[in-house]
Image (cartoon, rainbow, N blue to C red):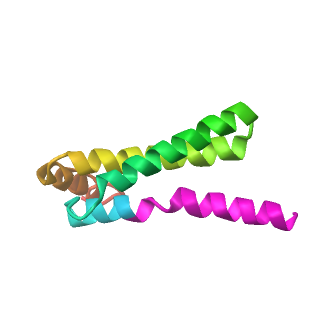
Amino acid sequence: METITIIGTLAAIFTTIANIPQAYKIIKDKTSKGVSAGTYLVLLIGTSLWTAYGILKSDWPLIITNSISSLLSIVILILHQIPDRKIKKVNKALSNTGGKK
């Protein structure tokens, strides 16, 4: 694998998973206080444009990674907009999965 391909692949992986810790923190802490909706809106616009660019160039790595990043940004924006009491329900529902009773 060429160095440029390795760098591009690593960049795609890291930028795609970058939003996961924030979504996890919101659910774990049961609040979205301190999260900048503006930041995630700008990020969503950027990743959506990268997705469109990937579609125009038929570049599947760009399409896949930026689509996932866009979806994660949407999840964070939704969590930011819902009341903390509903985030607590999401936390409880996720805590009850995985065989725990």
Q: Return the residue nearer the eye: 32 or 28.
A: 32
Q: Main secondary structure of the magenta part?
A: helix
Which residue occupies the foreground of this view, 4 or 16?
4
Front position in the image: 44 or 89: 44
View extreme (top): residue: 56
Residue 59's place in the image compared with 10, above or below, is above
- Left/right placement of residue 42 relative to residue 83 reads right
Tell whether position 19 is magenta.
yes
Residue at coordinates 20% horizontally, 62% vertically from top-left? Answer: 33
Above or below 42: residue 60: above
Q: Position of residue 21 (x, y in %)?
A: 41, 65
Residue at 62%, 60% in the rendered image: 13
| Magenta highlight range | 1-21
Left or right relative to 74: residue 66: right
Q: Position of residue 63 (x, y in %)?
A: 64, 41
* Quadrant of the frame with the N terminus: bottom right
